[in-house]
Amino acid sequence: MSAEQEEAQGVTASERYLAWLGKNTFLSPWCYPNLYTDEGKKADSGDGKELCDLLVVFKEHVIIFSDKDIAFKDTGNLEVDWGRWVRRAVLKSAPQVFGAEKFICEHPDRIFLDRKCTQPFPIALPSDDQIRIHRILVSRNAVERFRKHASGSGSLMLNPAIVGKEMERTPFQVGSVNPEKGFVHVLDDLALDTLMRELDTVYDFTSYLSDKETLVSSGRLGISAGEEDLLGFYLSQSNKDRDPGFYVNDEDLIVVNEGVYDEIKDLPQYKKGKELDASSYFIDGFIEYFGKHAKNNTWHFSNAEDFDSVTLGIREFASESRVGRRILADSIHEKIRSLNPNERGVRLLLSPTNPETMYVWLVLPVSGHFESYQEYREFRAGLLIAYCQSAKLLKPERRVVAGVATDPPGSNGGSEDMIYIDTDTWSEGDYAEARDVREKLGLFKESNVIEKSERHYQYPVKRKITDDGAKRQKEKERKKKRNSQKGARRKNRRRK
């Protein structure tokens, strides 16, 4: 790693840690630490101005992180110490977040990866009518002092009714920094770790931020004992009919007590969900692998013209929630395990998260019919396109098809192909071609497709099969007894 690249990961230890967290949560194709602008740069040899500590751009979402490592001094006077810390770590730091937001909106083409401003930011920023900006201020070093002052986790309390400088008089409570400019998520060390560990996909993380922002703006959040407990409340609201969220009636005021998050973590279904999530990181690794090639421009072949275009396929996979990735990974692995050596296999997967998206996963062995590996790859790519075209005819309501083709696991080749098709632009000629291909090759025809549907839960409750069976058996015995008693009474009536 070059000195320039090393510096780009963060100047301070806390910035490097933030960059590491960001990469694990949002994945590297959409996560960029220490960006620069050409603001104030007067010569080619001059340096640009730092934009923010971490920027995440994914579809319409833009997340701006600013990291502040301000010491929380102990003079023996808590009110004075808190006032000084919150003034520097929060109130005087928030304008940097607002400044970054303003520059991003006004000059999206003047953002760079390096200090000398020679490497343009590769992702196109969302348009003004689509962009959703989330502002995060990481304010460190208050947790330990809070733990000394009171029992509990040490995470800062959230009280949106406290505005601006009022925070200087409310130790260990943060509120709304500047409501006129938009809500800023003030996260301490503990809150940052917890959120990025629990919500470790861009879908889950931005869903929480968006729902929290809506809750705060509605005036329905009274106070939360800590960010992790607010998250615990959010997770606790999910059930078989709805995802996690803040489901609040107009007349309700939410007060989140301490310990909610710990209670969630102690539930057996929470632990079971985490066990099941292990398989989902296969999708993360796959996204990161393709994303690395996209960043380094090391594709074997690509007809995409820019970074946004070349990442369209993996962006669909990255749009999945953690549960969605679990479902996809389990289905892919199930199909691969079912294949015999040298057997072709394909699976059509409907996105659990995005109702307009579906995936085709093709495994094709290398056979002696091909004169070279290159010929095999060309055939495989063509077959993948044919499957994706046929998938659209089978599921016409799905607009986007992302296809992946691979060698079987453990084969000597080791290559992958990806295709992205947005059928929104299809002409009648495209549909006619798809019908012709499907008919000739017999791909994804209703007569040879077995469709499976199953409900999955983030935190599944283990069914007590033996108990249910015993209950059903007892009910059968009671019913049999009642029927025999009725039969005996009817016989007695006939005798009379």
Image (spheres, rainbow, N blue to C red):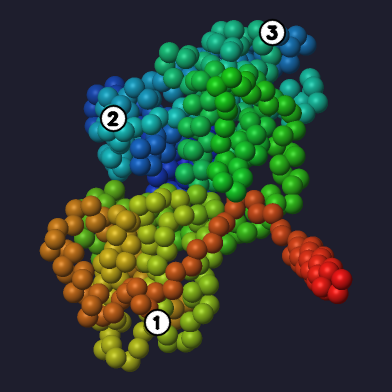
Q: Which residue is mark 1?
A: 344
Give me the disc on residue 477: none
Looking at marks 1 and 2 on the same chain, the residue that comes earlier in the sequence is marked by 2
Q: Residue 383: in sight, yes or no?
A: yes
Q: Quadrant of residue 314?
A: bottom left
Q: Nearer the viewer, residue 387 or 147?
A: 387
Q: Tell me the crowding category of disc 1: few under 14, some 14 to 19, or many 20 or more residues within 10 angstroms, Cα based.
A: some
Q: Which residue is mark 2?
A: 129
Quarter of the image with the C terminus is bottom right
Looking at marks 3 and 2 on the same chain, the residue that comes earlier in the sequence is marked by 3
Q: Which residue is mark 3?
A: 80
Say which element carries label 2: loop
Specify whether 376 is left or right of 134. Answer: left
**Residue for point 21% across, 69% down:** 434
- Marks 3/2: CA–CA distance: 44 Å
**Residue for point 69% across, 8% down:** 80
Judge whether 84 appears above or below 391 on screen: above
Given the image, on which type of amino acid does mark 3 rest? Val
- Marks 1/2: CA–CA distance: 45 Å
**Residue for point 74% across, 11% down:** 78
